[in-house]
Image: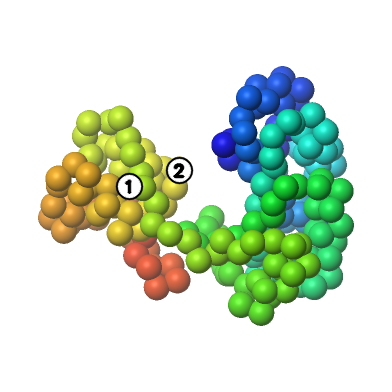
Amino acid sequence: MVITNGSLCYDENVRNEVRQADIIMPTLDAWDEESFKRINRPFGKLSFEKVYRGLLELRNSFPGEIWLEVMLIKGLNDSKEQQEKLAERIAKLKPDRVYVNVPLRPPAEPWIEKPDESTIKRARELLNATSIEKGTSGKFVSSESNAESALLEIIKRHPMSRNDICSFLEQRKINCKQFLREFEDLVHVKKIVYNGIVFYRFMEEG
């Protein structure tokens, strides 16, 4: 499986590279240029239409299955009207499956919230989707022999919960409680609580 934000599917070389996969799981959270900029904050001159056309080209050329993921964010793409617009775009892509997700880990902005249960239920019905918003503990691995260095590299890209870190340390037979006491004191490590769960994320100095 290839998991991707789908932003480079317009590139024929990229589409050719992923042809050997069984499943591709791209993301589509927006339906036009305005919503794309607001939700996804694209790099440079990347436009919604360019990304969307790339997904259509992927659908036409990829021999495997496409599982589309939709991240619902309260106030950005969770109203009935917004979801109906999104449903129109998704229908043209004809994905084999659609999954609805919500922010489970600390997002880039503190004001980001997940929609309520009734909104998620409506999205499942409108998008003919399966809900995966409950989440499970991730199993993180690293080839880095030093646990501290390994965890710092991971949280640069992906906030980790306390349970995630303890699970990672258990694989290496390291005492989690003792390790976290020192880990929390590192200058680049920030401990935060999101949705009642303790997470650790990487913070640049200053």
User: Could you tell me the amino acid type at mark 1?
Assistant: His
**Mark 2 element type:** helix
Contact (CB < 8 A) between labels 1 and 2?
A: no
**Mark 1 element type:** loop
Reading the image, the residue beneath label 1 is 188
Label whose residue precedes the other's in the sequence (1 or 2)? 2
Q: Position of residue 75 (x, y in %)?
A: 69, 70
Counting every numbered tag in the picture gives: 2
Q: Which of these two is toward me, 51 or 173?
A: 173
Residue drawn at the location 75% of the way across and 25% of the way down: 11
Taking 129 as reference, is 158 above or below it? above
In the drawing, does residue 71 fall left or right of residue 180?
right
Q: Position of residue 91 (x, y in %)?
A: 84, 53
Residue 14 visible, this angle? no
* Neighbour tally class for label 1: few under 14, some 14-19, many 20 plus, Cα within 10 Å: some
User: Could you tell me the amino acid type at mark 2?
Assistant: Arg
Residue drawn at the location 34% of the way across and 65% of the way down: 198
Reading the image, the residue beneath label 2 is 157
Residue drawn at the location 65% of the way across and 22% of the way down: 17
Q: Position of residue 36 (x, y in %)?
A: 76, 51
Q: Which of these two is toward me, 64 or 135?
A: 64
In the drawing, does residue 158 fall left or right of residue 180?
right
Quarter residue 73 falls in: bottom right
Q: Position of residue 50 (x, y in %)?
A: 82, 37
Label 1 or label 2, whichever lies nearer to me, is 2
Taking 146 as reference, is 206 above or below it? below
As measured in the structure, the alpha-carbon distance from the residue carrying label 1 to the one carrying label 2 is 13 Å
Disc marking residue 49: none
Quarter residue 24 falls in: top right
What scheme was used to colour the molecule? rainbow
Quarter residue 43 falls in: top right
Residue 163 visible, this angle? yes
